[in-house]
Image: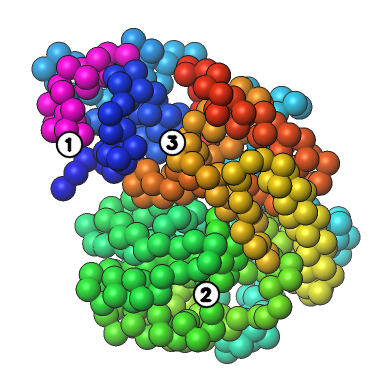
Amino acid sequence: MGSRLVEQLGAHNVAGATASGLADRIRALILDGRLTVGERLPSERALAVELRRSRSTVTRAYGVLETDGYVSRLHGGSTRVTLPNGHTAPGAEADDDSIDLSIASMDSTPGLYDATVRSLPRLAALRGTSGYSLRGLPELREAVAQRFRDRGAPTSADEIIITSGALNAVNLILTAIGRRGERALVEQPTFPHALEALNRHGYRLLPTPVDADGWDTRHLNETLMSSRPHVAYLIPDFHNPTGATIPDDERPRIVTTARNVGTHLIVDETTTELDIDRGWAPIPMAAGGPNVITVGSMSKIAWGGMRIGWVRAERSVIARLLAVRPSFELGTALLEQCIAVELLSDMPELSAHVRRRLRAGRGAVEAGVAGIPGFRMPPTPGGLSAWIDIGAPLSTSLSLAARERRLVLPPGPRFTTGGVLERRVRIPITLPPERMAEAMRRLTLAWGDVREGSASRTAELQHSAVI
C-alpha cells in the first residue's frame, strides 16, 4: 500500500519533476491542508522507490523543505510536517482587498432580522427550562420533518435530531456508528472536510467518480457490492463541488444496493434547497430505506452564522446518537433554534431569495469564464459553485498564482482523496456580481501568470478551510 504523501501528490503529477519542483508540490500540499502539521512523511529511500526517482532527488527536495521550515528531520529518524516560524494563521493576512473563493456561501437572508425578532417570545418561554436540548426543540424537529414529508419522504419528529450544523451532524454520526479500519465510499471530488472527518475516524476511503455530467452509477454500485463499505458519504443534490444531481430512477437502486451489503448511507442535503432552474424536484434518498442517514443545514439557505443542522434517521440510530452526544456537546443553541423555526415557516420567500442571488452569481461567473481562453464552465442549474475545467493540469499552480493577486482559490485536488483533478477548480456562484467580476478579473491575470511562467515559485497557498 502506497504512502499518503504519494496518494496526495499523484505519482503522475511529479513524474520527471526536479528536486525543487517536488519540494514545491509537497509545500503546496502542506499549505493547503492536505498534509497536516506533525504528520510523518515517508523516508527518503521509501519515497524514492514509490516515485521511481533517485534517492538524491528526494534528499534534495526534503532539504529544500527543511531549509524553508516545512519539515523537520531527525538524523536517522523521521521526517515530519511543520510550518515555518512566523507563518500566519489561516485568514490572518486577509484584508479588504482580498477575495476568498474558498468560501461558497452567501450573506444572510433579508428575512433573518425579522425572524430573530419574531423568535424572541418563543425563547422567553423557555427561560424556565434547563436550556439544554439534546434532541432539539420539538417545534423545530417537526418543521424539519415537515420539509421531508413535503418532498416525499414520510418522517416524524422522533426521527430528527437538531445539531450545530451539518458537519457537526456528520461527526456525531461517525462517533456513534463509526468503525476504525473499515472502508468508506466517497465521491471524487467531494466536500473536503467530510473526507477529513472520515480520515479522523479511521476509515479507509474508496473513491467513486462524479463530474458535472453526474455519477458513474455503475461504478458506484459495483464498488458497494465488491467492497461492502461500512459507510458511504454522498451529496446527491447540487453536489459540492460539481453541481450534479442523482436522477430519481438511480436513487432507489443505490439505496437498495447499499442496504443489501450492509452499508450505512450518509446523505448530505446541505445544498438540496439551492435550486436555480433545475426544472424538477428529486425525491429524497431517505425515502428509499432505513439505511439512509440524512444530514442537512440552515447555513446555505439562511446564513453561515446560523449553526443549525439536523440528522434524519430511523429511531434506533437516533437513540445511538443521543447516547454519545453528551460526550462532546449538550445540545444546540436555543436562540438559533427559535430563529430557525421562524425561517422554515417561510420557505417560499427564503427559496426565492436564494434563487435570485445564485442566478446573479452564476451569471457573473459565466461572463468571467467566457473571457479566459481554454476555460469551460458546465451547466450549473443550482448549488454553491461551478466546477470549472481550466483546460490543463495546472490547478495547484493557478492557486499559487492567484494568491499573489489577492485571490484565495482552492485547487481541484483539495476536493479529492489522492491529488487528482488538476484540471479543475471550484468557483463559488455565491458572491455579489460586482465582487465576482473583480474575482474573475484577478483570476484572468493569475492564469496569464501561470501560462507565461511568471508566477512566483515561492508563493504560499495558505492552509485554509474550504466551505
Q: Position of residue 161 (x, y in %)?
A: 54, 71
Q: Main secondary structure of the magenta part?
A: helix
| Mark 1 lies on residue | 50
Q: Which element type, helix, strand or loop, lies under badge 2?
A: loop
Query: Rounded to the nearest whole Å, what is the CA distance between mark 3 and mark 1?
Result: 22 Å
Left or right, 161 with respect to 125, comes to left
- Please tell me how crowded label 2 is: few (under 14), some (14-19), or many (20+) other residues with Cα within 10 Å: many
- Residue in view at x 34 percent, y 71 percent: 219
The answer to whether residue 434 is magenta is no
Three-letter residue code for mark 3: Gly
- Residue in view at x 35 percent, y 28 percent: 26
Q: Which element type, helix, strand or loop, lies under badge 3?
A: loop
| Mark 2 lies on residue | 246
| Mark 3 lies on residue | 33
Relative to residue 52, is residue 340 depicted above or below? Answer: below
First to last magenta residue range = 45-65
Q: Position of residue 275 (x, y in %)?
A: 70, 69
Query: CB of mark 1 within 8 Å of CB of mark 2?
Result: no
Residue 337 visible, this angle: no
* Nearer-N-terminus badge (1/2): 1
Left or right, 281 with respect to 113, comes to left
* Nearer-N-terminus badge (3/1): 3
Left or right, 330 with respect to 307, comes to left
